[in-house]
Image: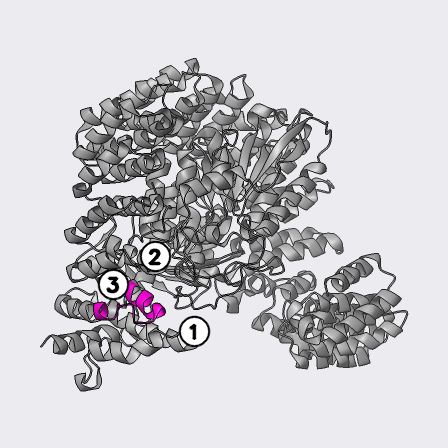
């Protein structure tokens, strides 16, 4: 049975009043009362959307002495419970506990978590269609943000996220963590230092675009706030493929559907197109033309950049394959090959290009919070990389070549394509 | 005429070249054809029809299709009446959301009053996305007539999404409405951001109730941002100044402080220092993040002068900001900080040097490294990353002159830096017998040595007595050769030395040549094996048994079966098992057959054990079936059990053969005496 799904602001207040669960009491000593980490140096974190990916972030952050997990939020009760258990188990193992308590907040609605003044920063691991709203609200609330990739559902959302982060002076790390891995940095340093001569083209090997959702209606299980799961997306009935039960241990398949994600293009694209952008030095720009395959002359989705480089979606190699006039560099996770092989035998010299050397994606974010500097995958980086993915998707969907102005972030000469830069949201959700 | 244009354009867009237009239906016909499917509640039926129509609609959005697009929209509008099934109406509304213009406005305006909330929402999305001023006017009119608070909220947000100044007269009065409505009206006015919106917001802010101040204040600031972008800097700066004081709501103040800095342009540095010195965490955070954005000639001198007066947390931010700016002229500031007494400033200075420093700071960093205090991890991190001129050279010199206690750390550092230039210096130490130093040295040389270093490595090899030490050096030769350019000539550097070498040196070199492998190397090794000289023959066999890949499997099998020397047979059989196990990862049953043959040839129990320990590389259920009977042999049960567990770890192998694996694991639990194997088997069984 289809039903309306708008959530009123009064509804929020009601929900807030009937908060999901009593706070869990944790011993203050586990956060440094034993002298290990002074309270003034601890960062307090909240986690929004603690599904498979964010759960692993939660566990890693909870293991750090310099961090205190203060709150978790999810629209699925089972996920909230699992998150609480993970935190409790970790904190129970810390030595020197006393009986004095501190609160672990447990929430269904992220706004309640963001309203807590004692939380410094949030980690966002919701499905993609929620990223922008939560991140912008978090920035507005004065929280620093770690947001899972892909950063947004639309190009407009990504730009709004940049504006909010800059506006409120926040630190934002996009979860495109390949930039914190040596092999990717080294590959991009070699490209930017001219070791393969002039860069001519790049093959980026990621999955396909998302599509319309045709999943049948199923009963909403107990403990799932389906309306909140949908949030800004158009209303549709529940299906477990989108929001699976705890017995499902893989990555849920909402990312296949257009209302919630850009599919493999944005999922892995936010990693590998991100590396292509880094290798080209395009962190504040993007392509000028996007040409979809036509089955004849154009076999692969093709991006043309103003610097003359062509980027293809697919077409060979693992991960990202850079072609230059004097060689090739192929890089993927734990894999780096160059042609000629000698290119990678020599470290980057003092007079070559040295890129930001992150101490680890999480560590880099925590350090940036303390120093107030931009981390390796700053919001602008995330915005530009995900925009490349979105542009590819739009070319696939509209099946026509698109000309793009990366400075204005507008399509040139295609008014209807410009309508896709952002999408209306179901009230009361907005990017403001 | 329009239909012909549509058909031609559609065919061009969809397939990239003109088609015979007679075969294409008009949009009207296409819609009629698809409509039953589009309206079906049955998902497999509606998907094809919906996608077919959607492709046609998207194609009509292309530039130059204006007339055909409008015609198509008119056809769609005819099918939005209540008698059309709901799935079809929703799908058609979704299409006009992306391609509808003025022709759709009137119908959509009517549909946002529909009784069905989903139709109403879909129509609102379509009207909200419609780029014409008429659509905005209809939304304004609908807002005027709306009474339900949720619906009013939706309409106000729709107007904000569009961002048209024409909405201001309708939205501005709502700033004094009930709080929930006033807050969203403020958000929408902020998004519109024109002068009229800014005026409405500034007027409302002064009288606003406290709970509304954040929403109205932020919206007012959004307007100020637009003023700034439009070059009205003084007007924008006045708004920022008004809203940056400590009494303002936190979000408003954060944005206002940031706005002040942006508006100050080249003159922002004193303001940054003032905010950093304020002991106000929010002001410090905003100003600290702005250091990297500061522009103008006097930035560095001003920051240098102001830095010592700032609180430690603010100094940390400035030092990190200077590092992010990458101006090496700031290096002296970082050096001073790296010598500071406060730990957080010292650490920040050291980390800044990783981006600003050069070889001249290496002694200081090594001094901090040796002090082994709270700054040492930062010094180590800095030394691993610092990339300025002369760093590697300074580290090599430091390594050469270091005490044995310090040397290991410096070797590891050079290895982490991938400092291939350090190889000659490392080789000078390579004969050390220091138990701490030697493993680090060998690891570093293994990771850094290049083909050009082979002559020096061979010289080292010839000086090294036979045994484990020489084995280690042979491996270094192998690693160095493996970095050669051409996979076909990796053996070239060793062969170049081998050919003119004395008979004695050739004996020493053969095993190393075997580790490198290669076609020409094989020829040399086989000649040695066929020699009448027993020593040369022995070295040849050792070389073949060192071979890095399975290309010599047949030669090894021949030796295992027929070498006159039993020791050579045994060595060849084990080498054969090693190389064939490299080829079995795809579950190749031919490889399993080779293992079976090797088992038939194996006489010694330890060889059979070795064989069983390697066979799990052949990831095939037939491997499991072959291994299981060995669980009954008490002398081989441990190795057989390990292989069963290894195979069971492969989910893709175990899941389709669940029963066989369950029985095998059960048997492992019964017979194995190996604690690790038992633990792993138990875990797998628990997961079944």
Mark 3, Cα crowd under 10 Å, few <14 / some 14-19 / many 20+, is many
Mark 2, Cα crowd under 10 Å, few <14 / some 14-19 / many 20+, is many
Q: Residue at x 39, y 34 (%)?
A: A140
Sequence order check: which comes first, mark 1 or mark 3? 1
Q: CA distance from mark 3 to mark 2?
A: 21 Å
Task: Indicate which disc residue B43 carries.
Answer: 1
In this view, which residue lies farthest toward the left?
B1
Residue A206 screen position, x and y as percent:
43, 62
Residue named by callout 3: B96
Residue B268 screen position, x and y as percent:
28, 23
Q: Chain of mark 1?
A: B
Q: Nearer the viewer, residue B347 or B503?
A: B347
Residue named by callout 2: A390
Q: Secondary structure at mark 3?
A: helix
Q: Residue at x 23, y 22 (%)?
A: B238
Contact check, label 2 and label 1, Cβ < 8 Å = no
Q: Nearer the viewer, residue B377 or B484?
A: B377
Residue A181 appears anywhere in the view: yes
């Amino acid at each position: 049975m289809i039903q309306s799904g708008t959530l009123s602001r009064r509804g929020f207040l009601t929900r807030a009043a009937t908060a999901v669960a009593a706070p869990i009491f944790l011993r203050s000593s586990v956060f440094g009362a034993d002298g290990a980490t002074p309270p003034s140096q601890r960062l307090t974190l909240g986690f929004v959307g603690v599904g498979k990916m964010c759960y692993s972030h939660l566990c890693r952050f909870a293991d750090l002495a310099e961090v205190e997990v203060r709150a978790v939020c999810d629209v699925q009760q089972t996920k909230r419970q699992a998150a609480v258990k993970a935190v409790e188990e970790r904190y129970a193992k810390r030595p020197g506990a006393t009986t004095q308590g501190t609160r672990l907040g447990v929430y269904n609605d992220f706004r309640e978590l963001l309203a807590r003044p004692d939380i410094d920063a949030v980690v966002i691991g919701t499905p993609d269609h929620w990223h922008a709203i939560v991140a912008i609200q978090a920035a507005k609330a004065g929280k620093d943000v770690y947001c899972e990739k892909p950063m947004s559902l639309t190009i407009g959302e990504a730009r709004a996220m940049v504006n909010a982060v800059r506006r409120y002076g926040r630190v934002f790390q996009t979860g495109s963590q390949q930039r914190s891995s040596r092999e990717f940095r080294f590959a991009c340093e070699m490209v930017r230092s001219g070791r393969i001569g002039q860069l001519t083209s790049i093959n980026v090997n990621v999955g396909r675009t998302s599509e319309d959702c045709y999943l049948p209606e199923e009963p909403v299980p107990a403990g799932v706030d389906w309306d909140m799961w949908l949030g800004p997306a158009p209303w549709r009935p529940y299906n477990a493929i989108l929001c699976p039960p705890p017995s499902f241990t893989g990555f849920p398949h909402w990312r296949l559907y257009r209302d919630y994600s850009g599919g493999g293009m944005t999922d892995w694209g936010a990693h590998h197109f991100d590396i292509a952008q880094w290798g080209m030095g395009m962190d504040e720009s993007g392509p000028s033309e996007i040409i979809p395959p036509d089955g004849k002359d154009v076999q692969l989705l093709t991006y043309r950049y103003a610097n003359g480089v062509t980027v293809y979606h697919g077409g060979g190699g693992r991960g990202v394959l850079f072609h230059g006039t004097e060689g090739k560099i192929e890089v993927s996770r734990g894999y780096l090959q160059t042609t000629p092989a000698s290119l990678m035998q020599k470290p980057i010299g003092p007079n070559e290009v040295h890129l930001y050397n992150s101490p680890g994606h999480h560590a880099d974010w925590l350090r940036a919070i303390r120093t107030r500097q931009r981390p390796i995958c700053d919001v602008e980086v995330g915005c530009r990389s995900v925009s490349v993915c979105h542009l590819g998707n739009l070319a696939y969907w509209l099946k026509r070549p698109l000309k793009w102005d990366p400075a204005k972030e507008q399509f040139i000469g295609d008014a209807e394509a410009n309508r896709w830069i952002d999408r209306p949201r179901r009230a009361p959700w907005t990017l403001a | 005429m329009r239909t012909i244009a549509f058909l031609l354009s559609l065919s061009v867009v969809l397939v990239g070249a003109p088609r015979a237009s007679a075969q294409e239906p008009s949009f009207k016909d296409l819609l009629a054809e698809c409509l039953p499917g589009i309206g079906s509640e049955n998902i497999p039926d509606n998907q094809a029809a919906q996608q077919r129509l959607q492709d046609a609609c998207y194609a009509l959005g292309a530039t130059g299709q204006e007339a055909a697009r409008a015609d198509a929209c008119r056809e769609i509008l005819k099918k939005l009446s209540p008698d059309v099934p709901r799935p079809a109406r929703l799908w058609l509304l979704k299409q006009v959301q992306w391609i509808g213009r003025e022709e759709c406005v009137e119908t959509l305006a009517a549909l946002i009053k529909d009784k069905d909330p989903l139709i109403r929402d879909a129509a609102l999305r379509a009207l909200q996305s419609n780029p014409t001023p008429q659509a905005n006017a209809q939304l304004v009119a609908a807002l005027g007539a709306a009474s339900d608070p949720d619906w009013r909220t939706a309409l106000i947000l729709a107007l904000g999404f569009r961002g048209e100044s024409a909405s201001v007269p309708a939205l501005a009065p709502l700033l004094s409405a009930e709080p929930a409505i006033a807050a969203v009206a403020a958000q929408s006015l902020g998004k519109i951001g024109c002068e009229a919106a800014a005026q409405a917001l500034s007027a409302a802010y002064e009288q606003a109730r406290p709970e509304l101040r954040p929403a109205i204040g932020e919206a007012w600031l959004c307007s100020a941002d637009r003023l700034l972008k439009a070059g009205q800097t003084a007007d924008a700066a006045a708004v920022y100044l008004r809203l940056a004081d400590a009494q303002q709501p936190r979000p408003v103040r954060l944005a206002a402080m940031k706005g002040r800095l942006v508006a100050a342009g080249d003159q922002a540095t004193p303001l940054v220092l003032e905010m950093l010195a304020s002991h106000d965490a929010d002001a410090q955070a905003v100003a600290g993040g702005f250091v990297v954005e500061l522009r103008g000639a006097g930035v560095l001198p001003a920051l240098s002068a102001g830095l010592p007066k700032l609180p430690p947390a603010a100094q940390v931010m400035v030092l990190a900001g200077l590092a992010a700016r990458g101006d090496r002229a700031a290096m002296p500031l970082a050096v001073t900080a790296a010598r500071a007494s406060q730990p957080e400033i010292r650490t920040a200075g050291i980390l800044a040097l990783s981006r600003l420093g050069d070889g001249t700071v290496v002694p200081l960093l090594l001094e901090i490294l040796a002090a082994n205090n709270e700054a040492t991890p930062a010094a180590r991190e800095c030394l691993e990353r610092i990339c300025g001129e002369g760093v590697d050279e300074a580290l090599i010199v430091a390594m050469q002159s270091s005490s044995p206690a310090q040397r290991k750390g410096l070797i590891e550092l050079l290895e982490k830096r991938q400092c291939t230039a350090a190889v000659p210096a490392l080789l000078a130490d390579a004969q050390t017998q220091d138990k701490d130093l030697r493993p680090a040295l060998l690891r570093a040389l293994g990771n850094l040595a290049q083909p050009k270093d082979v002559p020096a490595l061979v010289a080292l090899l010839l000086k090294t007595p036979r045994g484990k030490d020489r084995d280690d050096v042979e491996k270094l030769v192998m690693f160095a050769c493996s970095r050669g350019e051409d996979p076909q000539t990796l053996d070239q550097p060793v062969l170049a030395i081998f050919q003119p070498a004395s008979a004695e040196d050739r004996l020493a070199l053969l095993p190393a040549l075997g580790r490198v492998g290669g076609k020409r190397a094989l020829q040399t090794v086989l000649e040695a094996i066929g020699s009448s000289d027993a020593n040369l023959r022995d070295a040849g066999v050792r070389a073949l048994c060192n071979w890095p890949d399975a290309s010599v499997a047949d030669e090894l099998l021949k030796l295992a079966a027929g070498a006159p020397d039993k020791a050579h047979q045994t060595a060849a059989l084990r080498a054969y098992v090693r190389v064939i196990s490299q080829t079995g990862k795809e579950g190749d049953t031919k490889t399993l057959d080779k293992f079976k043959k090797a088992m038939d040839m194996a006489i010694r129990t330890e060889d059979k054990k070795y064989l069983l320990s390697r066979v799990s590389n052949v990831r095939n259920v037939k491997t499991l079936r072959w291994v299981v009977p060995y669980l009954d042999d008490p002398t081989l049960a441990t190795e057989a059990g390990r292989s069963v567990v290894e195979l069971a770890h492969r989910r893709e192998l175990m899941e389709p053969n669940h029963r066989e694996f369950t029985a095998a694991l059960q048997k492992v639990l019964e017979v194995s005496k190996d604690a690790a194997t038992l633990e792993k088997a138990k875990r797998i069984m628990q997961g079944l």
